[in-house]
Image: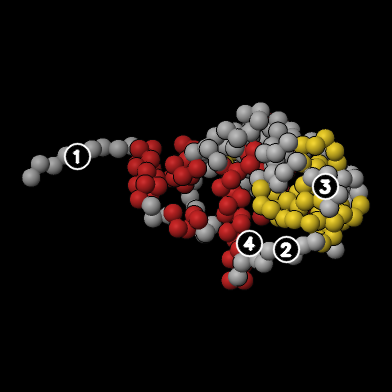
Amino acid sequence: MSTAQFTLNGRQNRELIALCMAESGVLTPYLERGRVLFKGSATVSCLTRRLTGTPLRICGRITANGMKGNSFATPQLGIRAQVQHLKAYASTEPLKNECIDPRFKYVARGCAEVVEWLGQQENPQGKGWATGAGYGEKIIAILKAILATAGGTAPAPAAVPFMVRVSVPDLRIRSGPGTNTAATGKFTGIGVFTITEVKDGPGSTKGWGRLKSGAGWIALDYAQKI
């Protein structure tokens, strides 16, 4: 029997491990349920790039090629830095606390107002967080799977009609259930509104509600049911 011998460096070994794991399908059922815990740095970065099209990022810092991610004194500060980094993408409003995210300044503020726009391929400005296709949709899918399995039962669909309270003055009204539909150019303003129909759609984890007035649809993430 002939024997072939190959010498691989550390980087090549990590890529080979990631390729085998990604293409074997062994992780697929766990990814679909959002139950994968990654540990390590370099190999994990190779694997996440294979699975999502982008290396693992910790508070915005790519950990490819074995680069060490940012570290913080406490878990609370680490989470705060991550939230600040996401806020940089989602909003132009100032931070409530001192900025501890070392890469906050590199983000184009407000370039990804909805989760789906975190992927550069789906972002209208081509900016976003990750280069992999459908990045934001994958996050939404995992979140919905987690919410559906919490307590062992899927949440029951909302009974309509019902009333909601909006506490923000500039909640945008859209022509359909999703950020992929045209904005009407109008806003709800602060007040109480009646919802007559609820549908899933991009840009809202809680769904979109049709206003009784006929003005359009609003994201229920920003409305409180009463």
Of callouts 2 and 1, the N-terminal one:
1
Q: Are marks 2 and 4 in contact (CB under 8 Å)?
A: no
From the image, tell me which residue sits under label 2: 158
Q: Amino acid at mark 3?
A: Gly
| Image x and y of residue 153, in percent | 60, 70
Q: Which mark, residue 107?
A: none
Q: Name the residue nearer the viewer: 94 or 27.
A: 27
Q: Which mark, residue 147?
A: 4
Nearer to us: label 2 or label 1: 2
Nearer to us: label 2 or label 3: 3
Q: Name the residue nearer the viewer: 145 or 184.
A: 184
Vertically, is 37 above or below 5?
below
Q: Would you call the spot at circle 2 few (<14 residues within 10 Å), some (14-19), or many (20 or more)? A: few
Q: Would you call the spot at circle 1 few (<14 residues within 10 Å), some (14-19), or many (20 or more)? A: few
Distance between the alpha carbons at the discs numbered 2 and 3: 19 Å
From the image, tell me which residue sits under label 1: 5
Distance between the alpha carbons at the discs numbered 4 and 1: 49 Å
Q: Residue at x 69, y 53 (%)?
A: 199
Q: Residue at x 37, y 47 (%)?
A: 23
Find the residue positioned furthest to the front.
Answer: 214
Of callouts 2 and 4, the N-terminal one:
4
